[in-house]
Image (cartoon, rainbow, N blue to C red):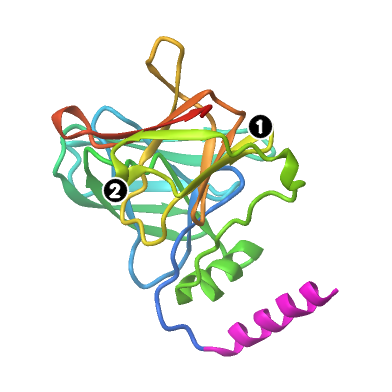
Amino acid sequence: MLRQISVLLALLVFALIPSIAAARPITGPDGVLRYPFGERTPPTLRCKPLFVCDLVLEPGESIVNVAVGDSVRWLIAPASSGGADSTTPHVLIKPTETGLRTNLIVTTNRRTYYLTLLSSDSAPMLRIGFLYQHDPQHDFATTFVGRGIRPDTPPPDTAIDKLDFNYRMSGDRRLQPVRVFNDGTHTYLQMPPGMSEIPVLFAVGTDGGDTLVNYRFTGQYYVVDGVPASIALVDGSGRHQRRAVISRGS
């Protein structure tokens, strides 16, 4: 009860404070990095050559037109997912080389989206979307995250004796988390505050190769589905790649 009262008081206090900074994006439960729609500064979508980035729009919305400033070196394709009653529109975006910068305008039957596109070899934003005024997460993002309050995800509500902290780390210290543990179902990597880049996460297979795994980044935590024996955090590519490996066991 006391905790609930404290949360309500915090909500009331922050609701009375005027916004002092642009709202930051938050990662939803579906793993999509979402920006509050309607901010003055257009969001920036960072893509990597040979990778496809997915711009996810509101379910039920219909794309009218897509325009990109550099249509030669950026490949843009509308797409959709879901059934006829709940179709979600997408815009698939892929740069052909690194070091590019342009803008993207998407018009729909409901609104107009403005974005800045960057191509970079590091930390691609593979799935981004938006929070809308009628979405409860929109209020959370603009009230708390927009004021510099990080939406830090607390450890899972599990008895401490059921958490496994038995991990070892190697590789680039700048990419290493400050804490790693699992609850038998998910693996949690708590990253240091103030990170400027979000590394890409892979599970490391028995052959030493990187394999895809479902995860999301929320606040300071990577939340990984399952309990991989070894996880790699990777930033950059080629000779400039930085890498940290987190493995289970002493």
- Report the label total: 2
Which label was assigned to residue 242? none
For label 2, the residue is 67
Q: CA distance from mark 1 to mark 2?
A: 26 Å
Q: Amino acid at mark 1?
A: Gly
- Which mark, residue 83? 1
Expressed as whole percent of the image width and height from the top left, the position of residue 32 reads 51, 46
Badge 1 marks a residue whose secondary structure is loop
Dot 2 falls on a residue whose secondary structure is: strand
In terms of image quadrants, where is residue 148? bottom left
Image position, residue 166 (x, y; %): 56, 34
Q: Give the magenta-colored segment's residue range.
A: 1-17
97, above or below 12, in the image: above
For this view, does 91 lie left or right of residue 145? left
Q: Is residue 78 above or below residue 68?
A: above
In the current view of this chain or complex, which residue is farthest to the top? 207
Q: 187 or 57: nearer the eye?
A: 187
Q: Is the magenta region chiefly helix, strand or loop?
A: helix
Residue 94 placement, left or right of 7: left
Q: Quadrant of the N terminus?
A: bottom right
Determine crowd level at label 2: few under 14, some 14-19, many 20+ residues with C-alpha closer than 10 A: few
> Which one is earlier in the sequence, the residue at label 1 or at label 2?
2
